[in-house]
Every structure is written in structure tokens, then in C-alpha cells.
Image (cartoon, rainbow, N blue to C red):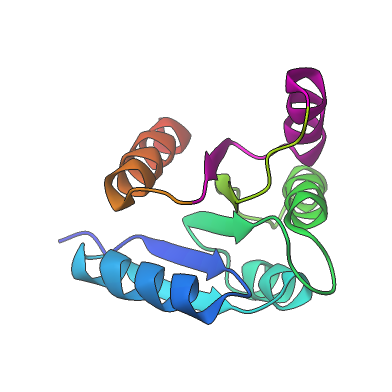
């Protein structure tokens, strides 16, 4: 049997972190967590996940920056394992053009807004990990 997909969840809100960790583990995923951007960046490089859920508003280094750094690392380091990144944010920017620019700059594969439905998160994980595997 294939191993469970490993998901790294980075969020500084303990309630969201615990909810995602518990819910995703119940769905059969192996879940690791981090409480800030720099810890998430370090964990993702040391033991690359199959998928990363990354909050935008994080202490130390925000999710947009972490996403961009990881995507550049994946491109430039031949040893790096590539994986999809989904941003999770309560913050909605004031203009569609700015939102599109930020999402493009961060190079994240998807963005879901809080409050979110677990099924939306799981569907995005499934879709993006299948796309990455093909």
C-alpha cells in the first residue's frame, strides 16, 4: 500500500492548526505543523512534504514570502523535491488586480479564504497532488 500523503500545515493560530491537523489526520494524511513562516520554511526544506498549507499572515516571514522562497528553492536546487503550496488567508486585498499580482508573485498553487470548509481544503489537496504526480 502507498504511504499516506505528508502535509505540512503552517499557521500561527493554534485553533486552526489543531483543527486542520486533526481533520486531515482523520482523512488519512500524515500531518506536520509549524507556527511561523521561518519554522515552516525550515521544515519544508528538511523534510519536504507532498503538500503545504500556508497561512498568509505569519510572524517572522509571511506566507507569500515563504511560498516564493520555496518555489525558487525547488527550481534552483536539483536535490529539492517539488510540492504544491496552498495559501490560507483571512485577508482579502482590496482589488482583484492586486490580489492576482500577489498570488502570482508568491507562486502558490492555490489560495483558500478563511473561514473555509474542510472539503474545499481536501479537494484542493487531492486535485493539486494528482496534478503534480502526473
Q: Is residue 22 left or right of residue 68?
A: left
**Percent of width and height locating residue 118:** 31, 52
Q: Residue furthest left?
A: 1
**Percent of width and height locating residue 115:** 45, 51
**Percent of width and height locating residue 37:** 74, 69
- Kindly identify the residue that appears in the image at 79 percent across and 52 percent down: 73
Quadrant containing the C terminus is: top left
- 2 inside magenta stretch: no
Q: Quadrant of residue 36?
A: bottom right
- Kindly identify the residue that appears in the image at 75 percent across and 36 percent down: 93
Compared with 23, 93 (above or below) is: above
Q: Is residue 118 left or right of residue 105?
A: left
Q: Is residue 119 left or right of residue 20?
A: left
Compared with 48, 107 (above or below) is: above
Extent of the magenta region: 95-114
- Kindly identify the residue that appears in the image at 74 percent across and 46 percent down: 71
Q: Residue furthest top?
A: 97
Compared with 72, 59 (above or below) is: below
- 108 inside magenta stretch: yes
Q: Quadrant of residue 4?
A: bottom left
Residue nearer the viewer, 115 or 12? 115
Q: How many marks?
A: 0
Compared with 109, 78 (above or below) is: below
Amino acid at each position: 500500500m502507498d504511504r499516506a500523503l505528508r502535509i505540512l500545515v503552517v499557521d500561527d493560530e493554534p485553533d486552526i492548526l489543531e483543527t486542520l491537523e486533526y481533520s486531515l489526520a482523520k482523512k488519512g494524511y500524515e500531518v506536520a505543523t509549524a507556527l511561523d513562516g521561518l519554522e515552516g520554511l525550515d521544515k519544508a526544506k528538511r523534510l519536504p512534504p507532498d503538500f503545504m498549507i500556508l497561512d498568509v499572515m505569519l510572524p517572522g516571514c509571511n506566507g507569500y514570502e515563504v511560498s516564493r522562497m520555496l518555489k525558487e528553492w525547488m527550481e534552483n536546487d536539483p536535490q529539492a523535491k517539488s510540492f504544491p503550496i496552498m495559501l490560507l488567508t483571512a485577508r482579502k486585498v482590496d482589488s482583484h488586480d492586486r490580489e492576482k499580482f500577489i498570488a502570482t508573485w508568491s507562486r502558490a498553487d492555490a489560495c483558500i479564504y478563511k473561514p473555509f470548509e474542510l472539503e474545499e481544503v481536501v479537494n484542493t489537496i487531492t486535485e493539486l497532488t494528482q496534478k503534480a504526480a502526473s
